[in-house]
Image (tube, rainbow, N blue to C red):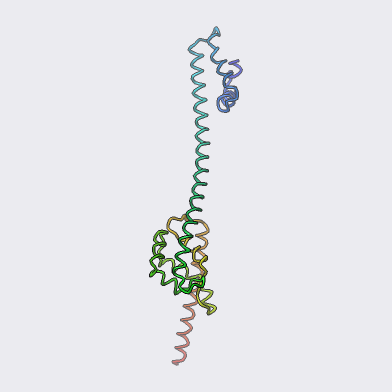
C-alpha cells in the first residue's frame, strides 16, 4: 500500500495532493504508513517519521488554504462593511445638508442663488455642517461656479437646486476617496475653465482693438 502511494516521485505528489491537501482519504494513508513498522525491512522509526512528516504537510497545506480563504472572506466583509457605513454616513450627512440648505435659502423657493451661496459663511449652522464634512466654503463656491454658467449665459437668475448643490458638497467632502469619475470630471471642468478664459481674453482683445481703431 505504501509503495503504491509513495513508490515514485509522481505517486508521492499525487498522494500528497489528494490525501494531504484535499484530504480525500487521509486516514487510509496514515494507517498504511503507520503499519510500516510491521514490515521486515522497515521499523518504528521510519514509520513514525513518515507519519509526522505527512501530518505536518497536512497541517501546513490546510492552514495555508484556510488562511487564504479567511483572508478573502475578511476582504469581502470589510468591503461590504465599508460600503454600508458610507451609505449610512451619506444618508446622515444629507439630513444635515438639507437643514443647512434650508438655512441659506432665504427666499424659500427651493433654489440656491449665487448670492445666497456667498452669504453661506455668515450662517452658523452652514459653517458647522461644512466643518464636519471637511469642506472649505471658498473652494465650494469656486466649484459651484460651473453650475451657474448656463443661467448667466441665458441672462437668468443664477440659481441651482438644493439637490444639485448637495451632490457637489458630498463629492468634495474631506473623507471621500478619489475615483476615476472625479478625475474625468476635473478634466472636463478644467477644459470649461480654459475655454471660458480664452473667450474672455478674446473678448477683451477685441475691445482693445476697437478702442485702438477708434483712436486712429
Total numbered labels placed on residues in the image? 0
**Is residue 93 in view from this perspective?**
yes
On screen, residue 51 above or below 194: above
On screen, residue 177 above or below 52: below
Q: Nearer the viewer, residue 71 or 165?
A: 165
Residue 21, position as x, y percentages in the image: 56, 27
Q: Tell which residue pokes out farthest to the top in this image.
A: 40
User: Which quarter of the rendering shows the C terminus?
Assistant: bottom left
Q: Nearer the viewer, residue 216 or 124?
A: 124
Residue 184, position as x, y percentages in the image: 52, 61
Q: Residue at x 49, y 44 (%)?
A: 78
Quarter of image, res 117: bottom left
User: Which quarter of the rendering shows the N terminus?
Assistant: top right
Residue 142, position as x, y percentages in the image: 44, 69
Residue 168, position as x, y percentages in the image: 49, 64
On screen, residue 168 above or below 35: below
Q: Nearer the viewer, residue 11 or 19?
A: 19
**Is residue 195 in view from this perspective?**
no
Amino acid at each position: 500500500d505504501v509503495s503504491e502511494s509513495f513508490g515514485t516521485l509522481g505517486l508521492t505528489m499525487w498522494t500528497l495532493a489528494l490525501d494531504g491537501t484535499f484530504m480525500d482519504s487521509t486516514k487510509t494513508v496514515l494507517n498504511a504508513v503507520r503499519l510500516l513498522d510491521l514490515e521486515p525491512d522497515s521499523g518504528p522509526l521510519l514509520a513514525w517519521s513518515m507519519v509526522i512528516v505527512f501530518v505536518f504537510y497536512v497541517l501546513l497545506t490546510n492552514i495555508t488554504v484556510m488562511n487564504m480563504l479567511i483572508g478573502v472572506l475578511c476582504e469581502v466583509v470589510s468591503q461590504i462593511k465599508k460600503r454600508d457605513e458610507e451609505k449610512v454616513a451619506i444618508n446622515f450627512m444629507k439630513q444635515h445638508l438639507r437643514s443647512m440648505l434650508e438655512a441659506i435659502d432665504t427666499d424659500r423657493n427651493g433654489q440656491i442663488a449665487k448670492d445666497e451661496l456667498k452669504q453661506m459663511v455668515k450662517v452658523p449652522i452652514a459653517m458647522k455642517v461644512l466643518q464636519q464634512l471637511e469642506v472649505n466654503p471658498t473652494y465650494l463656491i469656486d466649484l459651484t461656479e460651473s453650475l451657474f454658467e448656463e443661467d448667466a449665459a441665458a441672462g437668468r437668475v443664477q440659481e441651482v437646486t438644493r439637490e444639485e448643490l448637495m451632490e457637489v458638497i458630498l463629492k468634495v467632502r474631506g473623507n471621500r476617496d478619489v475615483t476615476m469619475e472625479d478625475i474625468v470630471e476635473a478634466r472636463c471642468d478644467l477644459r470649461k475653465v480654459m475655454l471660458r478664459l480664452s473667450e474672455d481674453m478674446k473678448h477683451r482683445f477685441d475691445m482693445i482693438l476697437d478702442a485702438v481703431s477708434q483712436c486712429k
